[in-house]
């Protein structure tokens, strides 16, 4: 009988195929003492391993260049230079001279180096920890004769389902989408950035499987159901048939939904709801532009950085933003400045704060690194020449931050003036409401910005003190918790997130939602299938509930009544992906659910 492992649905779709198990972890190494006469041979063995690692890295680099691009491939240059670092080699050889086996000598030195780099005062050096870990794993794998698990050699069309503990940026840039058809990870949740990236790539994914890498040996055939969040191991032929039938039904439903692209986003009782798309990668822009979205509600620019060793320069950013802006014609495109930090990190990661989500992240980092920030702002001002660009600052908690950001924007404009480069300066500026601090002090910001957008992934995380990326806490990540509902009401009478919540949000008065491009038709279907009157009654019932579960029950019951026995309700409501950015049209002043 086939076994199923339950995780969390991260990116919809059903696929089946052979497992590609990727164990990318530092292996355990035994302490091994060698005889004096074995020392020269051991040093030779160490150098041979380095040479093999170098060859492998060159292959990996070439592959990444082909699949992801030259900038992404450059991350491996850092790792190549570590393999040639004279001091590192000297320290390993010294330990071997003291009769330690090569693998243990290398293991000890790498641990030591990682610790030193992790606590270094210079961010650039702290960033190198991720590279050291990759080198640590790669060389030990060779010295210990372990199987090479790099995803690099998969033949095209091999239809593999990648199962791994977590998807790091350096693994992500190696992913060959012509070989991998689905992703399953032990770690992560639906709001972690692996999930966001999988949705952007359109790859079905299940995350938070906890110990899938332990339960599998790599020889299995599996069904991955990214819609309900299950991995079925060695399914029976009848199970495979049942899943393939379901996939066919889903494909039909998707087709039906696509037909909604041109339909108006208006409720049964005539209220308009602006529906915009979230865009994480510039390549998604065309798809999102044809999804029926009325513009971009959130472009997550940090995905230009994740998986890279260096920041993109002004020209590269300008091209990326312009590409998205042009894809949407004159429709509004809200571009968020870098939200690097938390779990969205460039290769090697930024500071190893003990609590990265409470640390040097988003606007905090950008204000402390004005040159980096101004490079982005100049690119945005220039891209604004090509359409309706609006700039949004993430993780704002004080008015000072807004003022500083505006000051740097003025400086960026002056720099463009000095260069004689054309740009637009009259752009609407907005902030994200992502913390209880912002929600409760939003009145202090209202005169200085043109719009607000609530990021519920973070608002829920910070209000409930529940790490959005922790698989162990996923059941506690409850956007319908009374505290979250109350905060959102305090902000602007609005709230949002998963499918059911679009319904709640409409009921609470929200008239502008931004969701992943692929979710636009589904949300539109909900908008068109409900009336504001019924949604408002459901939202009020949810507000009066004492628990998130009770609130969910109130909403679900009424939504099911509105949609009858629709198949997408029977399966449990599919995720809106990260459909969690929403703004009251015109911001706070106009949109109180209680009014
Ligand atoms: C959010 O926090 O809800 C949000 C949209 O931003 P991100 O998921 O990129 O942190
Ligand atoms: Mg956020």
Image: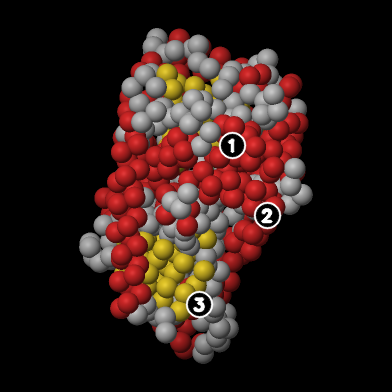
Quarter of the rendering occupied by the N terminus: bottom left
- The residue indicated by pointer 1 is 534
Q: Secondary structure at mark 1?
A: helix
Please, which colouring scheme is shown? secondary structure
16 vs 593, nearest the viewer: 593
Quadrant of the rendered image containing residue 144: bottom left
Q: Position of residue 508 (x, y in %)?
A: 63, 33
- The residue indicated by pointer 2 is 549
Q: Nearer the viewer, mark 3 or mark 2?
A: 2
Q: Mark 3 packing: few (<14 Cα in 10 Å), some, or many (20+)? A: few
Apparent side of residue 266 relative to residue 532 in the rendered image (left or right): left
Q: Position of residue 100 (x, y in %)?
A: 55, 81
- The residue indicated by pointer 3 is 214
Q: Are marks 2 and 1 in contact (CB under 8 Å)?
A: no
Q: Mark 2 packing: few (<14 Cα in 10 Å), some, or many (20+)? A: some
237 vs 132, nearest the viewer: 237
247 in relation to 291, above or below: below
Compute the Cα span from label 3 to label 2.
Answer: 33 Å
390 in relation to 288, above or below: above
């Amino acid at each position: 009988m086939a076994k199923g492992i339950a995780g969390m649905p991260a990116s919809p779709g059903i696929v089946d195929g052979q497992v590609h198990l990727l164990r990318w972890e530092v292996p355990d190494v035994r302490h091994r003492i060698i005889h004096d006469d074995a020392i020269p041979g051991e040093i030779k063995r160490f150098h041979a391993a380095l040479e093999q690692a170098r060859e492998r890295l060159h292959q990996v680099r070439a592959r990444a260049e082909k699949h992801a691009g030259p900038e992404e491939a450059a991350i491996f240059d850092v790792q190549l230079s570590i393999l040639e670092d004279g001091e590192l080699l000297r320290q390993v050889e010294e330990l071997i001279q003291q009769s330690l086996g090569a693998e243990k000598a290398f293991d000890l030195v790498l641990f030591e180096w990682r610790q030193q780099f992790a606590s270094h005062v210079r961010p650039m050096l702290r960033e190198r920890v991720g590279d050291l870990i990759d080198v640590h794993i790669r060389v030990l794998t060779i010295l210990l004769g372990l199987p090479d698990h790099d995803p690099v050699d998969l033949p095209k069309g091999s239809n593999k389902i990648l199962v791994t503990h977590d998807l790091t940026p350096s693994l992500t840039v190696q992913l060959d989408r012509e070989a991998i058809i689905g992703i399953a990870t032990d770690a992560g949740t639906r709001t972690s950035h692996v999930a966001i990236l999988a949705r952007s790539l359109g790859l079905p994914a299940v995350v938070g499987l906890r110990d899938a890498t332990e339960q599998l040996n790599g020889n299995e055939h599996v069904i991955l159901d990214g819609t309900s969040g299950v991995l079925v191991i060695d399914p029976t032929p009848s199970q495979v048939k049942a899943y393939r039938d379901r996939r066919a039904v889903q494909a039909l439903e998707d087709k039906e939904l696509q037909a909604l692209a041109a339909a108006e986003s208006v409720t049964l009782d005539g209220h308009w709801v602006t529906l915009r798309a979230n865009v994480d990668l510039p390549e998604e822009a065309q798809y999102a532009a044809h999804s029926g979205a009325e513009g971009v509600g959130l472009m997550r620019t940090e995905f230009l950085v994740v998986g890279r060793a260096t920041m993109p320069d002004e020209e590269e950013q300008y091209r990326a933003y312009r590409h998205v802006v042009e894809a949407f014609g004159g429709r509004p495109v809200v571009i968020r400045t870098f939200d690097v930090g938390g779990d969205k990190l460039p290769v090697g990661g930024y500071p190893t704060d003990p609590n990265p989500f409470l640390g040097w992240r988003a606007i905090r980092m950008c204000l402390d690194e004005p040159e980096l920030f101004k490079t982005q702002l100049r690119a945005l001002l220039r891209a604004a020449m090509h359409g309706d660009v609006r700039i949004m600052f993430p993780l704002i908690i004080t008015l000072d931050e807004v003022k500083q950001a505006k000051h740097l924007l003025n400086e960026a404009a002056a720099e463009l003036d000095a260069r004689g480069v054309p740009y637009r300066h009259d752009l609407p500026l907005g902030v994200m409401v992502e913390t209880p601090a912002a929600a409760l002090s939003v009145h202090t910001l209202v005169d200085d910005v043109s719009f607000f957008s609530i990021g519920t992934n973070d608002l829920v995380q910070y209000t409930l003190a529940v790490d959005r990326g922790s698989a162990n806490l996923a059941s506690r990540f409850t956007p319908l918790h009374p505290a979250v509902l109350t905060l959102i009401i305090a902000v602007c009478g609005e709230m949002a997130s998963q499918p059911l919540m679009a319904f709640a949000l409409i009921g609470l008065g929200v008239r502008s939602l931004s969701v992943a491009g692929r979710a636009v038709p589904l949300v539109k279907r909900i908008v068109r299938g409900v009336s504001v009157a019924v949604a408002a009654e459901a939202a009020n019932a949810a507000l009066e509930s004492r628990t998130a579960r009770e609130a969910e029950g109130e909403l679900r019951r009424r939504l099911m009544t509105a949609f009858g026995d629709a198949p997408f309700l029977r399966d449990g409501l599919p995720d809106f992906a990260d459909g969690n950015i929403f703004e009251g049209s015109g911001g706070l002043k106009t949109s109180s659910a209680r009014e």
